[in-house]
Amino acid sequence: MDIKLPAAVTAYLAADKAQDLDKLCQCFTNDAQVHDDSRQYQGRDSIRSWKEQTAAKYHTLEPIDAAVTERNVKLHARLIGDFPGSPADLHYTFVLANGKIQSLAIH
């Protein structure tokens, strides 16, 4: 399925797939927040640490569908990796500001 996503989300997904932490972190605003697995990460340094920790377990993120508005992207995706319950369908909620990701919540 071909899903049309804003540039910041497309760049995030590409950087995630390439495991390029520098490019991934550049997708976020300086004060961005990520909420994942009942934890909150604030700022690019904290987001980098989060991705370093999760990269070993989660190998593939396959977008399934998305609902896109001017500032929000709700992405339904399948996460595949070395973790109990793999693959898992998750919901990613991106909030955008000035062409970057201001917040990301993963459920």
Image: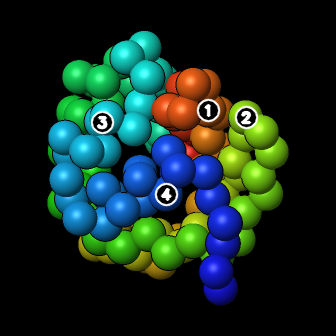
**Labels 1 and 4: the sequence-earlier one:** 4
Name the residue tied to disc 1.
Answer: 96
How far is disc 1 from disc 4 in space, using C-alphas?
12 Å
Label drawn at residue 25: 3
Amino acid identity at mark 4: Thr
Local crowd size for mark 2, using a 10 Å CA cut-off: few (<14), some (14–19), many (≥20): some
Q: Which residue lies furthest to the top in this view?
A: 31
Are the two marked residues, 3 and 4, in contact with CB atoms closer than 8 angstroms? no
* SS state under label 1: strand
**17 relative to 102 in the view: left or right:** left
- Residue 10's disc number: 4
Q: Which amino acid does label 3 sit on?
A: Cys
Mark toward the start of the polypeptide (3 vs 1): 3
Frontmost residue, 14 versus 40: 14
Q: Position of residue 49 (x, y in %)?
A: 21, 33
The number of discs equals: 4
The dot on residue 53 is: none
Residue in view at x 23 percent, y 65 percent? 18
User: Which numbered disc covers residue 71?
Assistant: 2
Helix, strand or loop status at disc 2: loop
